[in-house]
């Protein structure tokens, strides 16, 4: 059996407010006999739905819900992993199912020190890869974008021109030369994801930026750039540095670049690449992610794989064990520049490991592609029941016989009145035309506001 911790980034690093639905993606990895620790009871429909697709018997899963803690069950309170009630329930299950020796591994979505404390309290430290490293706060270190640039330099991989800064004056001094060279820079928070913690500073209002992952955009006055730059940092340093708690990354912006990644699995004996994929942004917001990545020139793929392996080896030498994503951009002239490393079970994991390889067998002939999407802003999905019913009515629910259709990636939480549900789903298809047919059929149903059936 495995013990699976459905957590997310520690709130002390970044408060994500309510992740009850998103962290239930851990259920995609659960197999018969596993024990899953969650912050709240899972959505019963989603539990049945996910296990039906993976072939797991939900009756053979043991679910432990921690006490609500400081976040009312919206997040897994790190302190509640070692709460006596949590530990007693886990020990009780282990006592009835082979004892501690029956545990093969402990793995968590986020490499928190609290998971190490949990393993230590159960005398299962050896079942948590990299336990000692995590117990000393290593999870924050290896997920810090500023630390990434340091380790990337040590690994000898190519990164975009830029630097790490620790105060507003240093930031302004570093920003000006990059703006003079490229006309735009990316400002990155040390901890954030999917472009939410990135801001573009642009001196050319006509520069195309929609393809980039940067939630925020600022146009600076070119007539007096030093003054505009200093004013920007005076205003935005608190945001960029999370109230001064973390350093900030400044990088040159590369127009017309593709965003790709290569994930790795780091163990005590070595490392293994697991998948390559591509991220696409619409209006600077993450909209689609596709695996496997097949349309990369051989020379570019070689750069991505080799650089990813060097980074993974460096992070392994530091002490990290587990899943790791090396993110990069491909410049128009075919150069791969690495942009960050996410040392965690990323939002890509279930797309390739569970959907593409366990359910769909995407590389088997005829090949399939899996594209995960966020519900577009112009769609209005009133609730989960309506979306699932629509998939059935349109014949778009995933069909194992054709290996095509839609898999809903997470529970669909009913939205506040007057708004649409927000969630992710994956489209499985054979050709781009197949993807478009599914997408257009759903768009025709949900692009206009609708209401649930009476």
Image (cartoon, rainbow, N blue to C red):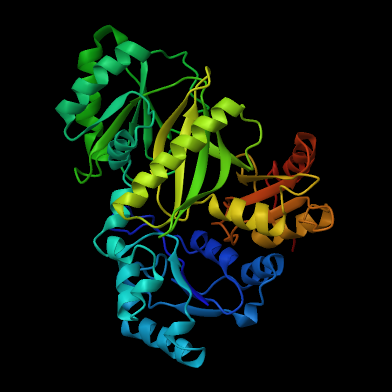
Residue at 39 percent of width and 57 percent of height: 321
The percent position of residue 189, horizontal first and vertical second, equals: 31, 39
Depth check, front residue: 208 or 125: 125
Residue at 25 percent of width and 44 percent of height: 242
Give the quarter of the image for residue 320: bottom left
Residue at 38 percent of width and 88 percent of height: 88
Residue 80 visible in the snapshot: no
In the image, farthest residue toward the top: 223
Residue at 45 percent of width and 77 percent of height: 65
In the image, farthest residue toward the front: 269
Residue 373 visible in the snapshot: yes
Does 76 sit above or below residue 122?
above
The percent position of residue 192, horizontal first and vertical second, equals: 37, 45
Left/right placement of residue 375 relative to residue 96 reads right
On the rendered image, what quadrant is the C terminus found in?
bottom right
Depth check, front residue: 353 or 419: 353
Depth check, front residue: 275 or 187: 275
Depth check, front residue: 211 or 393: 211
Left/right placement of residue 393 relative to residue 326 reads right
Does 206 sit above or below residue 34?
above
């Amino acid at each position: 059996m495995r013990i699976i911790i459905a957590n997310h980034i520690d709130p002390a690093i970044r408060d994500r407010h309510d992740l009850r639905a998103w962290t239930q993606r851990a259920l995609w990895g659960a197999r018969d006999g596993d024990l899953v620790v969650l912050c709240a009871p899972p959505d019963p429909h989603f539990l049945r739905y996910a296990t039906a697709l993976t072939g797991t018997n939900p009756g053979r899963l043991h679910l432990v819900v921690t006490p609500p803690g400081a976040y009312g069950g919206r997040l897994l309170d790190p302190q509640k992993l070692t709460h006596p009630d949590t530990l007693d329930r886990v020990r009780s299950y282990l006592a009835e199912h082979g004892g501690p020796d029956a545990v093969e591994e402990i793995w968590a979505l986020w490499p928190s020190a609290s998971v190490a404390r949990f393993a230590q309290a159960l005398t299962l430290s050896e079942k948590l890869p990299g336990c000692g490293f995590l117990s000393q706060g290593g999870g924050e270190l290896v997920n810090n974008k500023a630390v990434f640039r340091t380790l990337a330099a040590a690994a000898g991989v190519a990164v975009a021109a830029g630097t790490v800064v620790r105060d507003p004056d240093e930031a302004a001094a570093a920003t000006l030369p990059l703006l003079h060279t490229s006309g735009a820079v990316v400002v990155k928070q040390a901890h954030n994801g999917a472009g939410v913690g990135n801001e573009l500073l642009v001196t050319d209002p006509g520069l195309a930026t929609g393809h980039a992952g940067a939630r925020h955009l600022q146009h600076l006055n070119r007539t007096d750039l030093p003054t505009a730059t200093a004013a920007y940092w005076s205003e935005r340093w608190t945001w960029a540095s999370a109230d001064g708690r973390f350093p900030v990354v400044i990088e040159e912006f590369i127009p017309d670049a593709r965003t790709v990644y290569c994930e790795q699995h780091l163990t005590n004996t070595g490392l293994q690449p697991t998948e390559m994929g591509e991220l696409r942004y619409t209006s600077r917001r993450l909209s689609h992610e596709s695996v496997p990545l097949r349309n990369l020139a051989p020379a570019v793929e070689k750069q991505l794989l080799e650089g990813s392996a060097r980074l993974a080896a460096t992070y392994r030498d530091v002490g990290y064990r587990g899943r790791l994503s090396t993110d990069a951009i491909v410049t128009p002239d075919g150069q791969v520049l690495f942009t960050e490393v996410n040392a965690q079970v990323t939002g890509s994991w279930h797309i390739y490991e569970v959907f593409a390889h366990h359910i769909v067998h995407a590389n088997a002939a005829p090949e399939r592609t899996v594209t995960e999407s966020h519900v577009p802003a112009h769609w209005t999905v009133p609730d989960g029941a309506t979306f699932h019913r629509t998939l059935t009515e349109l014949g778009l629910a995933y069909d194992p016989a054709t290996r095509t259709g839609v898999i809903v990636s997470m529970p669909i939480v009913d939205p506040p009145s007057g708004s649409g549900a927000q969630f992710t789903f994956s489209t499985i298809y054979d050709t781009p035309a197949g993807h478009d047919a599914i997408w257009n059929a759903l768009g025709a149903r949900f692009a206009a506001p609708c209401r649930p059936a009476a």
